[in-house]
Image: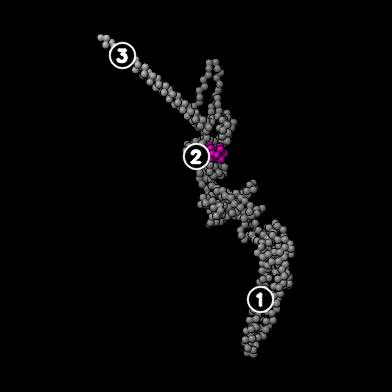
Amino acid sequence: MKDIFSSVDLTAKSAKTLTQSSQRKLAYCLLLIAYCGIFISCNKKKTEESHEEEKSSTELALTESQYKTVDIETGFVEDRNLNKIIKANGYTTVPPQNSAEVSTLIGGTVKDIYVLEGTFVNKGKVLATIQNLEVIEMQEEYHSAVANIEYLQLEYNRQKTLSDENVNPRKIFQEVKAKLAAERARAQAAKNKLDALNVSTKGSSSLVPILAPINGYVGQINIAKGAFANTGVSLFEVVDNSQMHLDLNVYEKDLGSISIGQVIDFVLTNQSNKSIKGKIFGINKSFSNQSKTVAVHAKIDPADAKGLIPGMYVSANINITNATVPALPKDAVVKNADKFFVFVQEEEHVEEKHEHKEGEKEESHEKEIHFKAIEVIPGTTDLGFTEVKFVDKIDPQAKIVTKGAFYLLSAMKGGGEHEH
């Protein structure tokens, strides 16, 4: 019997020891669960705060009175025909036939200069004269040849008559005929030289006139009175600005959209207050080795070309054929940092309930209008409208702010969300 009671007592002690061990394990488990709960709660709170912060950075609300004060207007995305444009840079120039470098075919000392830089001259106007004594020898050679031709012509006629009557041998007639031809050739050669130098065959002068080859304005003058003018060296530059055109540099990616006849609008880079129109008339068929662009040539109306000179840098917009694209008034698109946004008026939010303590005066709370900034990629701007592509899809019937978007952007950036 005593043994039985001893066994029972031992069993009770073991049970008590086991119960204490289980309690410690249970307490440890509860503590671990509590820590996990706190960690999950903190993460959830951080996530909620992050979402709330992201939401507040793209959303804002105005009261009805603020809405009316700002005079916000809304509209919808429309399909519009807009002119697509390609931007290009270039410079003014003239056709090769409208620009001349004036030089001389014979060297000599500069005797006189009759023009100044910027002077308008007609074709054939004497710009300067140079002196060379070889010209006198050319004139003397011409006069000598002409005199010999007169004598040989008479001898030719006489010998021809004698030869026809078989009085003189025909050989003598042939010799006179050959001499006459040679003198005529010598006279013609001397005349051609004098004509090339623009020197008269009459009289005797050592002066060679330098003439303007085209109508235009005198550009740079590279000679001085008394200096020696060498052959093949430019003495004057004459430019006719009446046929001014543009050389624009277009990149390969835009080349497929360019065609002859397209209208361009350009402004002078240093005088952007005046827009001038032109029309494309030629496209090069080779790339520039340095810039990897293709030169596109555009005519300028002569009336608009007044005051332009070759070498002026321009910025041009090449107008491409109309295209139907989704568009909004240009004031609806605003820029924040390096991104573009429009504001969408959201559906009416459920108004918060405001609890008041007993005896507290009831205050009126204005209805709020909520807006959300939606990122877009702007395209062509034409006739007051801008092409827009939405980064994320939106409801086609969404109300978009068309007036007052800049105010909303300022309010959003400055924490302008209304608070009660």
- The residue drawn where x is 64% and y is 79% is 181
Q: Is residue 276 visible?
A: no
- The residue drawn where x is 57% and y is 50% is 88
Task: Judge from the rendering whether residue 415 lies leftward or rightward of residue 162; answer left or right.
Answer: left
How far is mark 2 from mark 1, CA to CA? 84 Å
Residue extending furthest bottom?
167
Is mark 2 in CB contact (under 8 Å) with mark 3? no
Residue extending furthest left?
1
Task: Judge from the rendering whether residue 242 lies leftward or rightward of residue 205; answer left or right.
Answer: left
- The residue drawn where x is 56% and y is 33% is 413
**Mark 1 burial class by Cα count in 10 Å: few <14, some 14-19, many 20+:** some
Question: What quarter of the picture does the N terminus occupy?
Answer: top left
Q: Which residue is mark 1?
A: 186
Q: Which residues are magenta?
A: 328-342
Comparing labels 1 and 3, the label whose residue is closer to the camera: 3
- Compared with 174, 132 (above or below) is above
Q: Which residue is mark 2?
A: 390
Q: Main secondary structure of the magenta part?
A: strand
Q: Amino acid at mark 3?
A: Leu
- The residue drawn where x is 47% and y is 36% is 395
Q: Is residue 104 magenta?
A: no
Residue 327 in picture, x, y percent from top left = 52, 41
Residue 275 in picture, x, y percent from top left = 62, 48
Q: Amino acid at mark 1?
A: Arg
Q: Is residue 343 visible?
A: yes
